[in-house]
Image: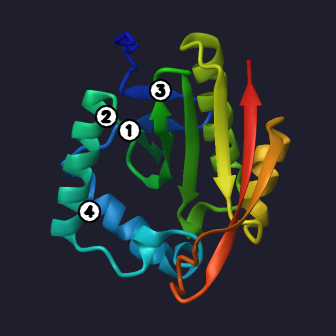
Amino acid sequence: MTVPLPRVPTEFRTARLLLRAPCPEDAAAQVAAVNASLPELRRWMHWAQEPQTLEGARENLARAADAYASGENLRLLIWNPDGTELIGSSGYHSLDWRVPKWEIGYWISTAHTGHGYAQEAAQFLTTYALDTLGLRRIEIRCDPLNGRSARIAQALGYRLDAHLVNDDVNAADHSTLRDTLVYSITR
């Protein structure tokens, strides 16, 4: 049985943010935001272990744009309201259209942390997925040591479903393992 895929817009606005599907033209902004934030991102993100290059970012964003268009992965870049400064990234990942259930991920560039942008984006994406798209389950996963990320899930009313022990390799040190917290909200 084929599950019909809902059409998801490529742009959303919250009170303070523009969330937009990525495109290769965003490469310079992504390189600047990621590379300025590497010391913080390295601890949590496997993809943030080396500085990004402009060519690598263009390729990454082209793949992300294709994945968005196909409904495989719905990554969104988080911009200031007029779209001139990249604040971070969020979006829907690990899409299972059969249930339907998705995971929300997020990161905020170091220059913009502490202003509630990740929580604002995740709140919007949670509400949109549940109320507009009719999802039945949304997850936020994080390392137990990433207290900021866990607090966002808790503040948005997500329930802690599981503490997975030795679930992944440590992003910054592949010789050690890390745990994963799985938070969810269901309908």
Amino acid type, label 4: Ala
Work out whether 13 lies above or below 41.
above
**Which residue in the protein does label 1 denote?**
73
**Which residue in the protein does label 2 denote?**
68
Q: Position of residue 16 (x, y in %)?
A: 60, 37
**Which residue in the protein does label 4 denote?**
28
Q: Report the quarter where the C terminus lies.
A: top right
Q: Secondary structure at mark 3?
A: strand
**Which residue in the protein does label 3 denote?**
12
The answer to whether residue 37 is seen in the rendering is yes
The Cα atoms of the two marked residues, 2 and 1, are separated by 5 Å
Give the mark nearest the N terminus, 1 or 4.
4
Q: Position of residue 66 (x, y in %)?
A: 22, 38
Residue depicted at x 34% and y 35%? 72
The Cα atoms of the two marked residues, 4 and 3, are separated by 22 Å
Viewer-nearest residue: 18 or 72: 72
Q: Report the quarter where the N terminus lies.
A: top left
The answer to whether residue 80 is seen in the rendering is no
Please say which color scheme the image uses: rainbow
Work out whether 103 lies above or below 134.
below
Residue depicted at x 29% and y 46%? 64
Q: Position of residue 4 (x, y in %)?
A: 37, 10
Q: Secondary structure at mark 2?
A: helix
Tell me if label 2 and label 1 are in contact, CB under 8 Å: yes
The Cα atoms of the two marked residues, 4 and 2, are separated by 20 Å
